[in-house]
Structures are given as structure tokens and as C-alpha cells.
């Protein structure tokens, strides 16, 4: 009877030990699975961050700069309004009694352009460390001269004693007048003050272009 009780207790203790061992093994397996998943997530997150840092690195290159500036094609850096006064004279024999003249003041909207379509990497010096760029550009050109006829001022004609009526212009006279106007406005547009302003505006426009492209300020120097 004593032996059977002892055997029963021994058997019961052995079963308890086996259960505890199984529970321990199960706990270890569960902990291992949890740790593995956490480690995988950690690695995946770290890998993602490195990718973002590479992508966010947006180093400016000559090729990118040439492409972006050439896409501008023709830049209009300056638009101004100019005026020009012409005196139309139809006096006979250069005598006051036969005098007939008229003063007309014209206004024109004038624009410059700079053509970047032929820009190449040879025209650019880029220092990405100091954020400085040297660009060789063509001279500003006259893009348009558009006379605003609504602003034209016609003075009353000056008439000598023996002259009457207004000044009548033939189609040939009008053609010559328009040619003279274009030449006069073109000459005024070649003034160094306007040229310098056009170049200064071009520099500002290119700096804004690069700021939008890279989110960094680059100092641009233009040479002609």
C-alpha cells in the first residue's frame, strides 16, 4: 500500500514536470516569434529611412541646370513704355507764310528677350559647395515694339498765313513714319540703363527658378 502511494506521487510529480517543461518551451517559442517580428519591423524601418535620405538629396548638376534654363527658351526680362515725338513738316520753300507742320507723340510698349535655347554646359560654371553659378548669356535682344495708338497725341497743326487745313499723309508717308518710329524706339532701347536692368532682372529670374527647383539659394553671376 505504501509502495503504490509512493508510485502514484512519483507519477504525478513526473507529469507536473513534463507540463512545466512544455509550458517553458512554448513560452520560449512565443517569445522568439515576437522578437523576430519586432526585429524585422525594426530593420524594415531603418531601411526605409536610408532610402528617404538618399531621395531627399537633390544635388544640382550642370545637366539639370542646362535642361531647366533651356526650358525657359526665351525669357522676357524687361517690358517698358517709351515715347517718341515726331514733327511732320510740309512747309513750302521754307517760308513761314507757307508753313504747315504737326507734332505727334507716340507711345510704345517695348520688350527685351534673352534666348536660352542654345545654352550648353560649356556656358556654365557650377560650384555646388559655395552655391555660386557663372552663366554666359547672349545679349538682350529687342523682342517687340508695339505702338499703343490709343495713347497717341496729335497736336494742332501750325499753319502759315497762306496754308490751310490739316496735314494729309499718303500711304508712303505713313510707311516712312512707322520705319522712323521703329528706328527711334530701337535706339532708345539700346540705352545701357535699360540693358543693365534687363540683365539684372534675368539674374533674379534664374535665381528664383533654382530656388523653386532645389529649395536652396544659388548666387548667379551673368557674363555676356
Image (spheres, rainbow, N blue to C red):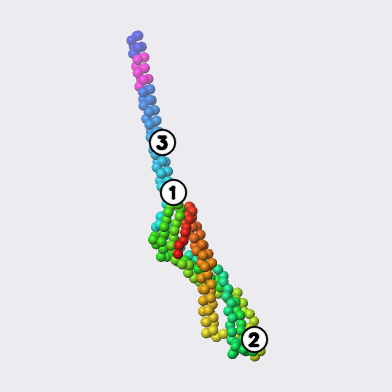
Dominant secondary structure, magenta? helix
Residue 17 is covered by the magenta coloring: yes
Which label number is shown at residue 193?
none
- Kind of element beneath mark 1: helix
Q: Which of marks 3 and 1 is in front?
A: 1
Of the numbered discs 1 and 2, the one sitting upstream in the chain is 1
Q: Which of marks 1 and 2 is in front?
A: 2
Q: Image point 41% across, 59% down: which residue?
A: 124
**What residue is pinned by disc 2?**
159
- Kind of element beneath mark 2: strand
Which residue appears farthest toward the right when viewing the image? 161
Q: In the shown orientation, is residue 45 left or right of residue 200?
A: left
Magenta span covers which residues?
Answer: 9-18
**What residue is pinned by disc 3?**
38
Where in the figure is residue 85, as x and y percent of width and height?
59, 77
180 relative to 41, above or below: below
For label 1, the crowd category at 10 Å Cα-Cα, with few meaning under 14, some 14 to 19 and many 20 or more, is few
| Cα–Cα gap, marks 3 and 1 | 27 Å
- Occupied quadrant, residue 82: bottom right
71 and 105: which is toward the camera: 105
Of the numbered discs 3 and 1, the one sitting upstream in the chain is 3
Which label number is shown at residue 56?
1
Q: Image point 58% across, 82% down: which residue?
A: 88
| Cα–Cα gap, marks 1 and 2 | 76 Å
- Occupied quadrant, residue 163: bottom right
65 and 219: which is toward the camera: 219
For label 3, the crowd category at 10 Å Cα-Cα, with few meaning under 14, some 14 to 19 and many 20 or more, is few
10 and 159: which is toward the camera: 159
Amino acid at each position: 500500500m505504501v509502495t503504490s502511494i509512493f508510485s502514484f506521487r512519483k507519477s504525478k510529480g513526473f507529469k507536473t514536470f513534463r507540463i512545466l517543461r512544455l509550458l517553458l518551451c512554448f513560452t520560449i517559442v512565443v517569445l522568439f516569434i515576437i522578437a523576430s517580428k519586432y526585429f524585422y519591423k525594426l530593420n524594415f524601418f531603418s531601411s526605409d529611412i536610408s532610402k528617404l535620405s538618399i531621395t531627399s538629396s537633390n544635388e544640382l548638376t550642370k545637366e539639370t541646370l542646362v535642361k531647366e534654363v533651356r526650358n525657359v527658351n526665351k525669357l522676357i526680362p524687361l517690358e517698358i513704355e517709351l515715347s517718341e515725338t515726331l514733327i511732320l513738316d510740309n512747309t513750302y520753300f521754307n517760308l513761314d507764310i507757307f508753313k504747315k507742320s504737326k507734332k505727334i507723340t507716340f507711345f510704345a510698349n517695348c520688350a527685351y528677350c534673352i534666348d536660352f535655347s542654345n545654352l550648353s554646359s560649356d556656358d556654365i560654371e557650377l560650384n555646388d559647395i559655395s552655391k555660386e553659378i557663372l552663366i554666359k548669356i547672349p545679349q538682350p535682344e529687342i523682342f517687340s515694339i508695339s505702338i499703343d495708338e490709343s495713347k497717341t497725341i496729335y497736336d494742332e497743326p501750325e499753319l502759315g498765313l497762306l496754308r490751310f487745313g490739316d496735314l494729309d499723309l499718303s500711304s508712303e508717308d505713313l510707311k516712312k513714319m512707322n520705319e522712323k518710329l521703329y528706328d527711334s524706339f530701337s535706339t532708345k532701347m539700346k540705352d545701357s540703363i535699360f540693358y543693365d536692368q534687363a540683365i539684372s532682372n534675368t539674374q533674379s529670374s534664374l535665381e528664383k527658378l533654382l530656388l523653386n527647383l532645389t529649395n536652396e539659394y544659388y548666387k548667379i553671376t551673368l557674363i555676356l
